[in-house]
Amino acid sequence: MTASQLDYFISAPYAAVTGLIDQLGEAGMGVEFELNDPEWILKVCELPAVSRLGRTLRQQGIGRLVQGPFYDLAPGSLDPYIREHTQKLYIRTLDIAAALEAEFVTFFTGYNTLLHARVLDQWFEVCRPLWRRVLDYAARLDVRVLFANMFEDEPEIQLRLLDGLPPELCGVCLDVAGAYAFSKKKITSWVNLLGGRLELVYLSDARVRDSERLPLGAGSFPLKDFYQACMKKSLVPDIVFKMAPEQAFDSLQLVRKKGLGQYQIELL
């Protein structure tokens, strides 16, 4: 009998993590650092202090991930100054991730259906050179980059972005709330199409056509169908609960109560 154990993470701002260390250890969870503040990333953050925190977490067996900034950023912008600012923030985020010894850094693709659907080829042409530079830098730091969906209505957009980038340096993060809100495709189709490129999942509950992230059990997201789709594809992505930390701890208990914390591959 073979059981596949999933690794679970909470997501929290950098300043909140120190106060969560004991709870993380007790729950057996890792932490994803949400780096959303450009001023903190570029001007306030001190890498030696970040390294000390990363070392403390590692010594206590707490896994580390990083979510990069996305507010007002546009890797596919036609304005070179916006792209330059975007890239600068991404690069500094990678420095922080390396100091934390993080396994993954997740960046949102920046795709917006209203802006890019009719100029998709141009959008890919503009954003890929920026992403290649980011990936080259990440490779030097030994940090893996994942691309998360934003407003995509189908997973093919993420896959097409990956097609033009080195596969050994990047993969996919699936934000289920976004996919559930903006796509007509079932979440099982997203999992099946992303397949082996799916390395991380941003998990929360949600409602149809509403991307607000909710604690598990508060919406209509088909949680069991999602887990079954992963099982059938033999996928074992890391799971980040995208919600307030206390809700994340409660959601983990719900997952375990439902028997989904680990799953039996041979039963499918």
Image (spheres, grey):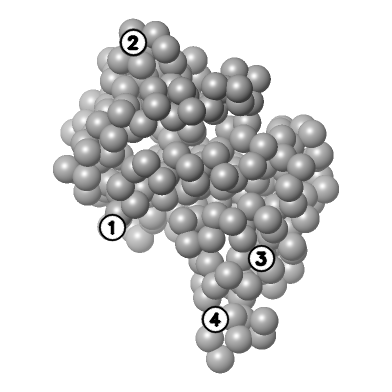
Q: Are marks 4 and 1 in contact (CB under 8 Å)?
A: no
Name the amino acid type tagged 3: Ala
Q: Is residue 216 left or right of residue 161?
A: right
Please give the residue where the numbered disc 1 appears in the rendered image: 59
| Along the viewing direction, whichever of 156 and 140 lies nearer the viewer | 156
Indicate the position of residue 184 as horizontal and vertical percent values: 76, 42
Q: Which mark is residue 3?
A: 4
The residue carrying mark 2 is 80
Neighbourhood count class around disc 4 (C-alpha, 10 Å): few under 14, some 14–19, many 20 upward: few
Helix, strand or loop for disc 3: helix
Measured Cα–Cα span from mark 1 to mark 3? 34 Å
Report the Cα–Cα distance between label 3 and label 4: 16 Å
Along the polypeptide, which appears first: circle 4 or circle 1? 4
Q: Position of residue 16 (x, y in %)?
A: 46, 34
Q: CA distance from mark 2 to mark 4?
A: 49 Å
Tag 1: amino acid: Gln
| Residue under pointer 3 | 229
Q: Residues within 10 Å of mark 3 (few under 14, many from 20)?
A: some
Task: Give the residue drawn at x 36%, y 16%.
Answer: 83
Would residue 17 be seen by someone viewing this image from the given angle? no
Residue 253: which quarter of the image?
A: bottom right
Above or below: residue 257 compared with residue 222: below
